[in-house]
Image (spheres, rainbow, N blue to C red):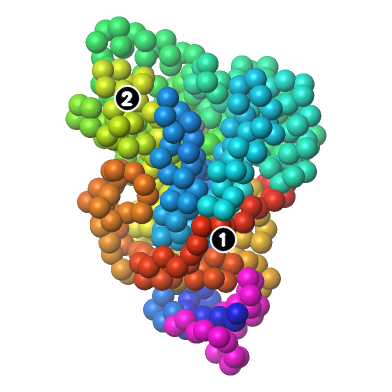
Amino acid sequence: MRTLIKNGTIVNADATTRADILIDGEQVALIGSDLDVSADRTIDASDRWVIPGAIDVHTHMELPFGGTFAKDTFETGTRAAAFGGTTTIVDFAVQPRGGSLRQGLDAWMEKAQGKAVIDYGFHMIVSDVRDDVLSEMDQLVDEGITSFKLFTAYPGVFFSDDGAIFRAMQQSATNGGLIMMHAENGLAIDVVAAEDVAAGHTDPYYHGTSRSPVLEGEATNRVIRLAEVAEAPVYIVHMSATDALNELRQARNEGLPAYAETCPQYLFLTLDDLGNGFEGAKFVCSPPLRPAEHAEELWKGLQTGDLQVVSTDHCPFDFHGQKDLGQGDFRKVPNGLPGVEDRVDLLHDGGVVAGRISPNRWVEVIATAPARMFGMPQKGTISVGADADVVIYNPNRTRTISAATHHMDVDYSCYEGREVQGKSETVLSRGRVIVDNDEFLGSPGDGRFLKRQRPNRG
Ligand code: URP
Ligand code: ZN
Ligand code: ZN
């Protein structure tokens, strides 16, 4: 199958070009002006941008959390991602406590195979660092699972102590993998949260206030310094606070290989969203939403390059039947927000349209940098030989975000009623059109497991 995309404006991270694109099979075969070649199908991209399919390196399909499971499956979640212009995800497989990494990986492979409609890779959540687990990390890196998430948060669930984190970092220094850190001081947070509940402060708002940004800054500094001594790079996930960003800036100014992502919820939502009684449960995630001034600093971090990636941390729980497990005690609200469908448009609207970042930087943070940092050189760019993951994007079309129209399997939207400018109109995954003008044309099982290379920290 040969597809010719005519008259579009290609927006890559490094350049914007008016050119046609010939796709042959699953890859981009030719890029040039006024291509005069035969094709089975021609797509007219006049007045449209042609961007690389976006890559979301932080999703949790079916994550077990707080006595329930994140609601999207690999089928519903990747379908929603595709509608939003995302053609690759990297999800988190979870090591069962006391079990092996292999058991966790096998379980997540099982969830994804035959279901995902777009390509997918896995990071591994390591919650029980043992000698045998350290050896397994080496094997997994060779098998394309080249990044590992550890937590200074969630004591008794995913938490690792500093010694365990340090050992995992030492291992990654030798095997070339990347340690990703959830950096909040979970032990201190649990003390504050217990005090809040004992004082009758049980509403979701106290989820936000009990998780001080200082405790995110402290944990961020700690894991960066552990990585420094282990001589390993470190990637901080879902950074939400100025306190943490300042620690990252300091480390990067010293030349340390420290990196971070933020997420749309920390750029567009605030602590106030956690108010309004139990409605605030819709916005319970960790780290929590912060006062508005933190968001402005995060935008600056994206502008300067101190933050490299915007991912979603997509982890959806229904308001009715899941979030309400935390009625009367905010600690029992399952942590996580839906978002895989809206990232590309939110970042276009709040970033490009609002004049904060250029179209090229937008492509970089949603596609190119994630591909480079997480070992997927065939993705994140429109160039000859790359996978033909291509989005025909209309930068002028507006839409209103709503749970009534989104494709994520969750009963609310964090952005209900927000109008955004910019929309993915046609989405190709390895040369196949999987979304065309609001119609889904893909199939479960079309997505392939990505054996990722070792991260290129670039
Ligand atoms: O609240 C969140 N972020 N839920 C998902 C698990 C995690 O920590 O990433
Ligand atoms: Zn986390
Ligand atoms: Zn997460």
Looking at the picture, does residue 245 appear above or below residue 66?
below
Q: Which residue is mark 1?
A: 446
Horizontal side of residue 399 vs 252, given as left or right:
left
Q: Position of residue 225 (x, y in %)?
A: 64, 25
**Magenta-colored span:** 21-44
Residue at screen point 64% across, 71% down: 27
Residue 81 position within the rendered picture, expressed as x and y whole percent measured from the top left: 45, 54
Left or right position of 240 against 269: right
Q: Nearer the viewer, residue 270 or 83?
A: 83
The quadrant in which residue 163 appears is: top right
Using the image, determine if residue 128 lies above or below residue 73: above
Q: Is residue 241 above or below residue 404?
A: above
Type of amino acid at the residue the image marks with label 1: Asp
Identify which residue, 85 or 180, lies in the foreground.
85
**SS for tag 1?**
loop
- The span from disc 2 to disc 1 (Cα, nearest Å) is 35 Å
Q: Which residue is mark 2?
A: 325
